Structures are given as C-alpha cells and as structure tokens.
Image (cartoon, rainbow, N blue to C red):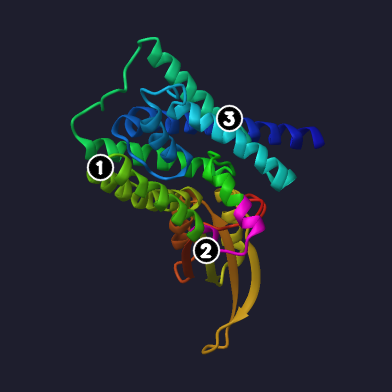
Amino acid sequence: MEKKINRKKVLLAVRDYGIMTVAIAIVAAALYFFKYPNHFVLGGMTGLSVVVGKFTSGTVMEWLTPATFVTISNIILLIVGFIVLGKGFGAKTVYCSILLSAFLQLLELLEKAGLFSTKEPLTDQPFLELFFAVALSSFATAVIFNLGGSTGGSDIIGMIIMKKLNIDIGKAMLIADLLIVLTAFFTFDARTGLFSLFGVFVATLIINSSIESLNRTKYFIIITDKPDEISKIILSTIGRDATRWDAEGCYTKQGKSVLLSVMNVQQARRLRTIIKEADPAAFVLISNSSEIIGNGFRQSM
C-alpha cells in the first residue's frame, strides 16, 4: 500500500514538473520574442532587465544582457530566500527560477549563433505583440502558481516581505511593479510606457482569472427524498464522495435528506442530468468554487 502511495506521489511530481517546464518555456519565449524586442516593461525582475539592457547595450557592460541580468538577480534572490525563508522556500520556486534563467540564456546563445534575431519586433503591430507577450506569459505563470511554484525574481521578494513585514503583500508587489513600469517612460518613450502600464493591468487580470478557472469546481447541495439512489449515483457513476445529513422542512415539517458533494465541472454536468432522472422533485443548489481544500483537491492552504 505504501509503495502504491509513493508511486502515486512520484507520478504526480513528474506531472507537475513536466507541466511547469513547458510553462516556463512559454514564459521565456514570450519574454524573448515579444517583450524584449518591444521594450515592454511589465514589472518584476524581467521587466527591470529590459531597462538594464537598454543602459548596458553598446557599453563596457554589454555583457549584462537582459537574460544575464535575470540569471544574476535570480541567483542572488534565491540565496537571500534560503537565508531568510529557510525550509519555507519551495523547491518548485527554485526549479522554475533556475529553469527560466537557463531558457533565456539558451535563447541568447541561439541568437548569437545566428539562428534568429530579436533586434527588431516580429511585426509592425505593437498592440498585437503586447497581446501575445501578456497572454502567453500570464497564462503560463498562472499554471505555475497553481502548481505551487513561481518564476522567482520579485515573487521571492514578496515571500520575504510577507514573512518579515506586516503589510498587504498584494499592494506592496503592485506598487513595486508600477514603479518598475514607470521607468519605461523615462528609459524609452511615452508610447512604450503606456503599452507597459496597460500590459501590467491586463496581466494581473489574466493571471487571477486563469488561476480561478484552473481551480474551478462545483459543489452540490441536494435536498431529496431519495438519498440512497442519488448517493449511489454520486459514488458509483460519478466517482465522487458525498456527505449526508437529515433535515426538516420549516414549512412542511417533513423529513428530508441533504447531500453535499464536490466535483469538477465535467462531473457536475453529468450529475445535474442524472439527478433530474433519479429524483425530479429534488431541490438542488449548484455553486462555483476555486478554493476547495481536502482529500481529492488542494492539499494545503
């Protein structure tokens, strides 16, 4: 039994790290092919790297490219994170931080080898490129967050602030990102700054909505006279569990059974149809939730 549980944990870990690897590759591609050529400064260390790259290009510090800056800053922040946060510092954050730096360095080497060039944007449509820069990186970042990881950089700073200071971490990170975005107005021009500012707000919306969508579940509260039949359907046909308790109608004073069950969206569609057939008189409440913690769902707060 223990071997079976361990094997399941290993498979889940392999799945999670595989998904995060693909997501990090998407983030790196969005940075390198859309953000860097257009100078989109969208907050965080990656946004700051665009500004740094502008000042170091063509100077004795030309070696400090955006990719190199991200690598150096991630290494420094990881070391600080280990010192300050200790065991609370997640392995997935370390993995994603190092992998993002590696992908960016690889893309830089491939560009130096002449396989492609990012000195100019891919198209002459900056809004289109902003869309792909924000959409790709934001959705991939949401996937990483959902699996308990992060891309490092300013996320590590946020973890430290959250542990050491009694302030709203969301507001603190938003202010920090906005300050970084404002540098785009002075480093480049108003057009680039406005695109960057717009991109930050859109990215926040996409990440939040994506995380909710990825975690979305349905929970049913079913008031019925046929609890045995519906319980059997939930257990055997849907493959979920349910909780049952007895209740009484305040007006009719008649005894009823109440069932509570939680499942994913696809299972919910099936159950909604089956309940109508099993007990047409059942009173059913169906609600959305993106925060279910417990066996079969998210395992921690």
Give residue 189's mark.
1
Other residues around mark 3 within 10 Å, as few (<14) / some (14–19) / many (≥20): some
Where residue 193 appears, x then y in whole percent? 29, 46
> Which residue is identified by label 3?
98
The answer to whether mark 3 and mark 1 are in CB contact below 8 A is: no
- The disc, 3 or 1, on the residue closer to the chain's N-terminal end is 3
For the residue pair 17 and 295, the one nearer the viewer reads as 17
Question: Depth-wise, is mark 2 or mark 1 nearer the camera?
Answer: 1
**Is 35 left or right of 265, judged from the image as shown?**
left
In this view, the mark in front (3 or 1): 1
Q: Report if the CB atoms under discs 2 and 3 are less than 8 Å apart.
A: no
Q: Quadrant of residue 113?
A: top left
Measuring 55% from the left and 41% from the top, which residue is drawn there? 150
Q: How far, Cα to Cα, is label 2 from label 1?
A: 53 Å
Q: Which residues are magenta?
A: 160-170
- In this rendering, the answer to whether 145 lies above or below 222 is above
Circle 1 — which element?
loop
Res 278 visible: yes
Question: Which quarter of the figure has residue 14?
Answer: top right
Label 2 SS: strand
Q: Is residue 147 left or right of residue 83?
A: left
Residue 117 vs 8, above or below: the answer is: above
C-beta proximity under 8 Å, tags 2 and 1: no
Secondary structure found at label 3: helix
Among numbered discs 2 and 1, the one appearing first in the sequence: 1
Which amino acid does the dot numbered 3 rest on? Ile
Expressed as whole percent of the image width and height from the top left, the position of residue 68 reads 49, 26
Q: Residue at x 35, y 10 (%)?
A: 114
Residue at image mark 2: 220
